[in-house]
Amino acid sequence: MTAVRVSAARRVSWVDRFLTVLRVTLIALIAAGLVAFVAQQISVDNAFARWRNPDATGLTAPQLKGLIVTGVAQGSMYGLIALGYSMVYGVLGFINFAHGEVFMLGAMSGFVASTKLSNAGYWESNFIGSFVIIVIIAILVSTTAAVLMERVAYRPLRDSPRLIPLITSIGVSFFIQNAVLGLLGPGSHSYPQLPVWLSKNRSILTFDVPGTKIMVMLVAAVSMAVLWWVVERTKTGKAMRAVAEDKEIAALMGINVDRTIVLTFAIGGAMAGIAGILWGISFRGVTHLTGFLPGIKAFTAAVVGGVGNLGGAMAGGVSLGAAESLGPQLVLEPLGVSGVSQLRDAVAFTALVVVLLFKPSGLFGERLSEDERA
Amino acid sequence: MSPVLSIHDLTITFGGLDALSELNFEVNEGEIVSVIGPNGAGKTTFFNAITNLVTPTSGDIRLDGESIVGLEPYQVTELGIGRTFQNVRLFPNMTILENVMVAQHCRTHQHALGALLQTKAFRQEEKEIRERGIEVLSFFGSRLTGYRLDQPAFMLSYANRRRLEIARAMATQPRLVLLDEPVAGMNPKESSELTTLIGRLRSEWGFTIVMIEHDMGVVRDVSDRVVVLDHGVTIAQGSYDEVSNDPQVIEAYLGRPAEEAS
Amino acid sequence: MTDIASPRSLLNQDWRRIAKIGSVTGLSLIFFALIGMLVQLDTRHIIRQYLSLGYLTVIWLPVMAGLVVVKEAELEGVTVHRKGPRELLTGALTGVLAGAGLSVLVVLVDNFDLREPLVNWSPQLLDQLTFGNGVGFGIVIWLVIGAGLGLLGSSLTVVPPLASRAVKAALLTLILVSILETAITDLFQGFSLSFITDAVYAKRGALTLTSSIILAAVVIAISVGLSGRGSQLRDSYDSLAAPQRRTTNISLSTAGIVALLVLPLFLGKIMNELLANVGLFVLLALGLNIVVGLAGILDLGYVAFFAVGGYTTAVLTSPNSPWIAPQLHFGIVILIVIVVAGIIGLAVGAPVIRMRGDYLAIVTLGFGEIIRLLFLSDWLSPYFGGAQGITNIPPVDLGFAEVKGSDPRSVFYLVIFFCAIAIYVSWRLQGSRLGRAWMAIREDEKVAEAMGINTVTAKLAAFVVGAILASFSGAIFAAKVGSIFPSSFLILVSIIILVVVIVGGMGNITGVIVGAIVLIGVLGGPKQPGLLQELGLYKLLIYGAILVFMMLKRPEGLVPNVRRSHELHQEEFLQDAWLRGEVDHDAEADEEENAS
C-alpha cells in the first residue's frame, strides 16, 4: 500500500514555509552564482561579475574542460561504488554504511599487490598484466569482505527495523577502518609510479585528457556494462530483481533468497573493489580513511540517481562528480566565497541535502509497504 | 439529520489500478455501519483514505460537511476520527497506560515548559489524562487495569492487544470510530463479548462506528447497515438481511451463501 | 519439564561446533597479534612481571571460547545432560584450536617476511610469541596455553555455581583493580591511605604477584561467604511497599549525590580531569539519548551542536576572536548559546525531519561535516579563525571561584551542574505529554500520527532539546580547553556518543550515564585518554566492535531498565504458571472480574 502524500490542499505549517524559503533561497543562490559566472566569462570587467567578487578572473576554456574531465572521471568512481549501495538498498532496504570500507579495502589490497609486483619488477615491465592482476586481487578481497559482512553482521538482523542494521553497519565501518589502521599502520600508502605512456595527456574531441582518466572512465564503463548484462540478462539478475520486489514470494517461487542476497553483496563488493583500484591509480595515496568520504558521496550519488536504479546510480555518480568539481568554481567563486577548493566536500554534501530537500524520499521515491517502519 | 461522514466519488489509484473507484458512502450520527467484502476489496484502503494515511486520487471526504482531504492524519484525528488497525499496531515498548495516555495528545495542551517547571496546570492535566486513560481501559473490565497498567504492551495476550487498540482509539475522544476487523483472531467467546462492547460503545459513549469485519455473526448482531465492497466498488447496501440475500454479494463471496461464511 | 540426564560420554562431542568456535577464536588471536596488541600493550602490566595487558588481550579470548562452546540452550522439553569431563574436554579442544592459531603465526612469522605491508610482523612479535625460547617452544606453548585456558573456561560451567561465581569474581576484581590503578591510588592518597596501595601495587605500577594472590583469596572468601546475600538483598528490596521503596531510593540516591560531590575533593588532578571529560560526555550522551533513545531519530551529525556551543562561547568570550569579541560573561553566554543552538537545531532539523529514518541519518552526518568544513574554511576564517581556531578563551568567573582547565575539579563541578539540569530535563520530559509523543514516534511513527500526534513538531522539539544539551557541553568544553579548533568536532565524536547511548540502553537515563562513565572512563573519548591509556590505539576499533556486538546481541542495552526488568520478572512468573497449566491469562482476568 503506497503512502505517497500529495501536499496539495494541506494546511501550510511554518515548517513548510521555512522549507519553501530554503528551497527558493538555494535555487536563487545557485542561479545567481551561475549568472555571475557567465557574466564574468563574457567580460571580466562586467559590473555583475564584480558585484560579489572583485578579483574574479573567470576560467579559460582548457581549465573548464579540465574540470569537467576531472569531475566525470571522479564521478565514474562514485558511480561504481554507488552501485553497491543501490543494489543492497534495493534488495534489503537498508543503507550499508560500511560499503565505503569495502571500497577502501579494494584500494588497499591494490596497494599491497602493486608494491609487491613493483618490487618484483613486473609492474614496470608489464603494466597491463599487473593491472589485471591487482584488479582481480582487489575484487577478491572486496567481495570477500562484503560477503563476510553480510554473513556476520547483517543476516541475523534481516527482520529488524531498518535503523538497526544501519547502526550495525556504522560499527562495521569503524571496525574495518581501524583494523586496517592496526594491520597496515597509519599514514598514506602510495601505489608505485605509473608508466609514462599511461599518464601522458591525450586529446579527445578537443579535450586534453590524462591517460589515467581515460583508463578510469573506460574501466568504469566496461564494469558497468558487465554489471548491466548480469542484472538484466542472466538468471541471477532475475532472481535479484525478484528478491528486491518481495522476498517471501521470491522464496515461494523457488529462489534461494540467502544466496541471492549474498550474490548482491558480492557483486556490489566487486564493483567497489574495481573502484578502489581506479582510485589508487588516480590518486596513488591510500589511507585507512580513504573509504569514508567517497562512501558518503557514493551514497549521495545513489540517492540522486534513485536508489535501486543501477543506471541511475552511475548517472548520479557522474553528475555528483561534475557538480563537486565544477560547483566551487562555477557557483561559489563568482559569489565571492574565498578558498573554494576547500569546500568541494561541502558542495557534495549540500547536493545531498538539496536533493532530499526537494524529494524527501529520494529522486525516485521507492515503494514503502504498510508494515515497513521508518 | 445530516451525515457525520459523507464520501463522494472517492477514487484511489495505485500504479494504474483502482483500489477504490467512485465510492459513495454516508454515515449518520449514532449509526453502526459494517463494511464487508472479500479480501482485496479495498476495505482497508477505504479506512486509510478516511484517516488520510492515503491521499485520494479524486473525490471528496467530508466530516460534518467539511472536507478533510489533504489534512495531515493527526489533524483528522483531532477533528474526531479514531481508528484501530487490522494488524494490531500498538506502541509495544510503552506501558498500557502510556498507550492510552499518548492517544490523548491532541486533546491536551501542556508544553515542555510546564513539565519542566511542574506547574499546577501541568500536574492537573497529567492527572486528567491518567484518569481518562484508566476510564477507557476500565471499559474492558479488569483486563487492562490494575497491575497491568504499568506493563509494556508487548506483554499482552493477542485478544488484549486488540482490546487495548480499541481503548487507544477511544482515548483520542473521537466522534467516529473506525474499527478494522476488531474480532479477527479471537475465539467465539471473546468475539461475542466484544460484540456486546461494540454495542455499548454507541449506547454509553455515543460513538458513531464504522467497522470492517469478516465475522458475519458479529456483523449481523451489531450493524444497523451493511455496505459490501468488491473491487473498490459498492455492490450492495442495506440491512444485514437485505445484503445477505443479494445475489451479487453471494457471487462476490464465491457463490457461498453469506450465512455459511460466518 | 526439563530432564536432567547423566553426563554424556567423553567422545560424544559436537565436533563441528568445536571446529567453528575454535578456529574463529584462533583467527581472532592472529588478528589481535597482527594489529600489534601483543607488542604495543606489553608495556602496561596487570600483574608485574607475570602478566601484561598485551598478553591479557590474547588470553581472555580462549577462556570465553571455552565458556561459550559448552553452553547449551536450555529449552522446554529438551533433555539437559549434567556437565562433566566431556565438557572439560570440549573446552580444552577448543582452546587447543584457538592456541593453534598463534602456533601457526609463530611458524609464519619465523619463515616469511611480511613486514611490508603488515607493520606488526616483527622480530619482536616472534620474540613475544615464543617467550624468547625459540620457535619450537613457541609452537608447543601456545597449544598448551590454549588447552589450559579453554579448560578454565569450560570448567567454570562444570564446577558448582558457587565456585564458578567466586572464580569469576576473583578474576574480574584482579583485572579491575589493576586497570583502575590510577584511580584507586589517587583516591587512597586523598584519604591518606596510600600505605595500602603501596602494598598492593608494585613500584612501577601493576599488582604484585603476592598482592594479587592475596586479593584473589580475599575475593573468593568474601564471595563464598556472601553467597546468596545479593539476591536476598534484592528480594527484600522488591518486597518493600511502594512508599518504603521510595524512601530507600531517595536515601540511596542522596548518598550517591553526596559521594559524587565530595569525592573530587579527595582526588588528584589526573582523576579530576578524567571525571570532567567523562562528565562532558555524559552531558552529550544525555542529549543524544533524547534524540535517538526517546524520539528514535538517528542523528549522526550531533557533534555539530557540540561545535556550535563551543564556537559561540569562543566568539563571545575570547579577546582573540577574529570577528566580534564582546568578551561577555559565561552566564550571559550560556543564554545566548541556548538561543543559537535552538535556532540552528531548528534550521538543521526542519529540512531533515520529514525524511525517512535512514536518509535522515546520512543527511545529518552530512550536515555535521558541512558545519565542520565551514569552520575550517578560509572563507569563514575571518569569523571563526579557520584551522587556527580561536584561542585564549577565558576561564568562567563564578564570583566565588574560577572554572578553568588547569583546575579540572572546578570544571567537574560545573559539568555536574549541567548534567543535573540535563537529567532533570530528560526525566521530566520523559513523563510528560511531549515525552510520550516521542516514544510513540519511536515505536511506530505512522500510528503515532494516526493517534493525533503532530510528528513534525514533536520530532523538531526532540532535535532542539538535544541540540541545546549538546551545546552546553560544547560551551563548557571551550571554557575548559581555553581554545577551540575544527579538529575537535569530527564525526567520530557523534559516533562515540552513539555507542555510549546504545550500550547504556536507548531511552534509559541511568543506563546512558553508566555507559558514558564506563566507556569514556576506561577507553576514553575521541581525543581524551581514559584509564587504559595504552588502549588508545585500539579505542576506535573497540568502539566499532562494541557497536556491532550490541546491535547483534543486546539492542536494548547492557544496563537493565529497572522498571522493565521488574516487569519481565513478573511476566516470567506468569508464563511459568501458564506452562504448568495453572493460569490462563484471560481466564484469570475473567475470574478477577467475576469476583469483583
Image (spheres, coloured by chain):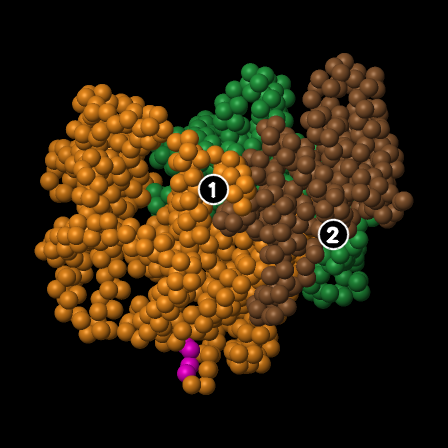
Chain colours: A green, B brown, C orange
Q: Could you tell me what secondary structure mostly forms the magenta stretch?
A: loop
The vertical placement of B171 against A86, above or below, is below
The vertical placement of A238 against B45, above or below, is above
Q: Amino acid at mark 2?
A: Glu
* Residue A8, image x, y percentages: 82, 46
The subunit letter for the residue under badge 1 reads A
The subunit letter for the residue under badge 2 reads B
Q: Which numbered disc covers residue A168?
A: 1
Q: Mark 1: few, some, or many residues within 10 Å (few <14, many ≥20)?
A: many
Asked whether, in this view, residue C5 is left or right of residue C313, the answer is left
Magenta residues, as a range?
C401-406
| Residue C388 appears in view | no
Q: Amino acid at mark 1?
A: Thr
* Residue C502, image x, y percentages: 45, 50
At horizontal 48% and vertical 60% (from top left) the residue drawn is C286
* Residue A137, image x, y percentages: 43, 29
SS type, badge 1:
helix
In which quadrant is the N terminus of chain A drawn?
top right
At horizontal 30% and vertical 69% (from top left) the residue drawn is C270
Q: Are marks 1 and 2 on the same chain?
A: no
- Asked where in the image residue C432 lies, by quadrant, the reply is bottom right
Q: Nearer the viewer, mark 1 or mark 2?
A: 2
Question: Where does label 2 land, which residue?
Answer: B78
SS type, badge 2:
helix
Asked whether, in this view, residue A57 is left or right of residue A127, the answer is right
Residue closest to the eye, A176 or A333: A176
| Residue B160 appears in view | yes
Q: Mark 2: few, some, or many residues within 10 Å (few <14, many ≥20)?
A: many
At horizontal 49% and vertical 49% (from top left) the residue drawn is B147
